[in-house]
């Protein structure tokens, strides 16, 4: 008999190619021995509560009709309504959206926000669409998933390739269908629509705050540290800027256009304006171009993966020479890579903790929308920092208690909260 854990896989996934959902299942297996009697409920975590697949047809500007595959997955709603972003990417799959939704359940519970976990996506490269095609696609998608979202049911937010404008279209479409303005249906909205100050920067700020906490634990001085960042969008760009402003040296940045490197430290402000003009870091003159594979091997205090999943894997994990990895992206490290990093003494601050700043300020936005009373940016940043520090402390304490990685510790904290809620609610009927 195989000693591999067995999962009752849904028939709609290919067992041989489980993708990100397979990674998530392995993470659940690692936490199960620490759940005590709550382990009785663990199967709840191994299947999404609800997965909606929708067809999104739109008329293109040239008069032809295009169809896109859209998803909204609600992984768990035991602790509150679903919450999680919407991703527009050509490689989006059901497995990926399921895993991202599950990581949202864990993340929201790890930082103790009163939410379950959800995620959505459309399988499309938005760069090939015009602005009006993008708007039509977003609106049709919102209308299709409208049956399961809502301010007290499931609240989408931006993710890869979606932004405040996307959220404005989603909010408007939902409100039109409902016949009432519903600002609380999405977060990450423009300020003019009930968005929150500080939301745009919140994820990158949270990454920076947890990095500083980890640095204290590992005796690293942030103000003289070297930093390398993969992904220079909302998360990576903000985190890099905050490190830079503290005096740290951001020595390499990689995005979809290549890797730029300057051992003396990149001018992050100039790099940000280069990216806003050129669409990527490639061609930045005050740096040398580096082979993408070499990026992972650079000696550095901090490595911040802030792009896509599976970037630190069996192939490159052994070459990582960072002291601390702070996961800005969701799911950037595979379980095998996690083991390799641990063996090599690399300290990993997991995604479910490190990048929770975005959903935390999304929560603040949702609370502000409900009360129609808005806080100052300073108030928001202070509350964010306090919440992230407390979450880091609780997870790091758990890691020490059980002698496990921060990831397993974050899963213990989170899964215990989710399953406690499941247990006291009981099974319906
Ligand atoms: N935006 C948020 O609030 C938020 C919150 C939590 C987690 N995240 C996660 O952070 C990650 C980045 O999200 P974002 O909002 O910054 O997205 P973004 O679209 O603003 O930026 C994505 C960045 O990744 C880069 N990238 C894409 N493909 C790449 C590749 N193959 N190799 C190297 N770089 C590549 C892009 O060039 C870009 O710089 C995602 O995993 C997302 O799920 C985002």
Image (cartoon, rainbow, N blue to C red):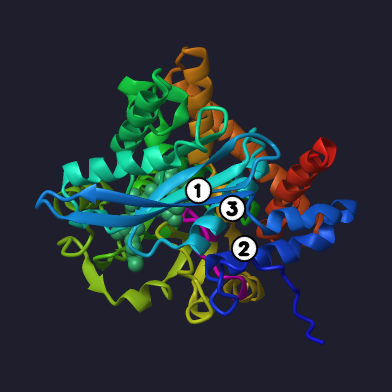
Q: Which mark is residue 103?
A: 3
Residue 153 in the magenta stretch? The answer is no
Query: Distance from label 3 to label 1 (Cα)?
Result: 9 Å
Q: Are marks 2 and 3 in contact (CB under 8 Å)?
A: yes
Q: Which of marks 1 and 2 is in front?
A: 1
Name the quadrant containing residue 189: top left
* Residue in view at x 41 percent, y 33 percent: 199
Name the quadrant containing residue 417: top right
Residue situated in front as seen by the camera: 195 or 178: 178
* Residue in view at x 21 percent, y 52 percent: 275
As drawn, is 314 to the left or to the right of 138? Answer: right
Residue 77 is at least partly visible in this image: yes
Q: Where is residue 315 in the image (x, y as percent from the top left)?
A: 49, 82
Residue located beneath label 2 in the image: 24
Q: In which quarter of the image is ligand 1?
A: bottom left
Q: Is residue 418 above or below residue 22?
A: above
Q: Nearer the viewer, mark 3 or mark 1?
A: 1
* Residue in view at x 55 percent, y 61 percent: 324
Query: Distance from label 2 to label 3 (Cα)?
Result: 8 Å
Q: Which of marks 3 and 1 is nearer the N terminus?
A: 3
* Range of magenta residues: 325-336
* Residue farthest toward the bottom in the current orientation of the protein: 1
- Mark 2 element type: helix
Give the position of the N terminus as an image quadrant: bottom right
* Residue in view at x 48 percent, y 40 percent: 358
Q: Position of residue 364 (x, y in %)?
A: 52, 26
Residue located beneath label 1 in the image: 119
Q: How crowded is mark 3: few (under 14 residues within 10 Å), some or many (20 or more)?
A: many
Q: How crowded is mark 2: few (under 14 residues within 10 Å), some or many (20 or more)?
A: many
Q: In this view, does 213 lie above or below 5?
A: above
Q: Is residue 371 above or below residue 187?
A: above
């Amino acid at each position: 008999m195989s000693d591999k854990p067995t999962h009752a896989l849904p028939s709609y996934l290919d067992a041989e190619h489980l993708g990100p959902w397979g990674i998530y299942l392995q993470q659940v297996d690692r936490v199960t021995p620490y759940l005590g009697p709550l382990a009785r409920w663990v199967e709840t975590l191994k299947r999404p509560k609800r997965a909606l697949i929708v067809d999104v047809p739109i008329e293109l500007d040239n008069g032809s009709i295009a169809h896109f595959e859209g998803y909204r997955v609600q992984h768990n709603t035991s602790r509150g309504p679903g919450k999680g972003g919407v991703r527009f990417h050509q490689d989006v799959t059901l497995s990926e959206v399921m895993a991202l939704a599950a990581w949202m359940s864990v993340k929201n519970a790890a930082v103790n926000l009163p939410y379950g976990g959800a995620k959505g996506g459309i399988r499309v490269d938005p760069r090939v669409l015009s602005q009006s095609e993008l708007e039509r696609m977003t609106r049709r998608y919102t209308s299709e998933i409208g049956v399961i979202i809502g301010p007290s049911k499931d609240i989408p937010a931006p993710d890869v390739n979606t932004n405040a404008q996307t959220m404005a279209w989603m909010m408007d479409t939902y409100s039109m269908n409902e016949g009432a303005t519903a600002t609380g249906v999405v977060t990450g909205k423009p300020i003019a629509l009930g968005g929150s100050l500080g939301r745009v920067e919140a994820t990158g700020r949270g990454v920076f705050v947890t990095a500083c906490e980890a640095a204290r634990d590992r005796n690293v001085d942030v103000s003289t540290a070297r930093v390398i960042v993969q992904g220079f969008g909302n998360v990576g760009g903000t985190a890099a800027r905050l490190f830079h402003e503290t005096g740290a040296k951001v020595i390499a940045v990689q995005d979809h256009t290549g890797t730029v490197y300057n051992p003396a430290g990149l001018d992050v402000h100039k790099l940000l304006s280069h990216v806003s003009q050129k669409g990527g870091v490639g061609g930045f003159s005050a740096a040398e171009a580096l082979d993408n594979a070499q990026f992972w091997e650079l000696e550095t205090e901090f490595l911040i993966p802030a792009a896509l999943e599976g970037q630190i894997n069996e192939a490159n994990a052994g070459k990582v020479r960072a002291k601390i990895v702070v996961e800005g992206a969701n799911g950037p490290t595979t379980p095998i890579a996690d083991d390799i990093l641990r063996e090599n003494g690399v300290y990993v601050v997991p995604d479910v903790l490190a990048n929770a700043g975005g959903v935390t300020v999304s929560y603040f936005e949702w609370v502000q929308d409900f009360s129609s009373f808005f806080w100052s940016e300073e108030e928001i940043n202070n509350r964010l920092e306090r919440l992230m520090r407390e979450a880091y402390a609780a997870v790091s304490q758990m890691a020490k208690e059980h002698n496990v990685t921060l990831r397993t510790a974050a899963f213990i904290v989170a899964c215990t909260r989710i399953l406690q809620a499941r247990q006291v609610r009981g099974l319906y009927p």
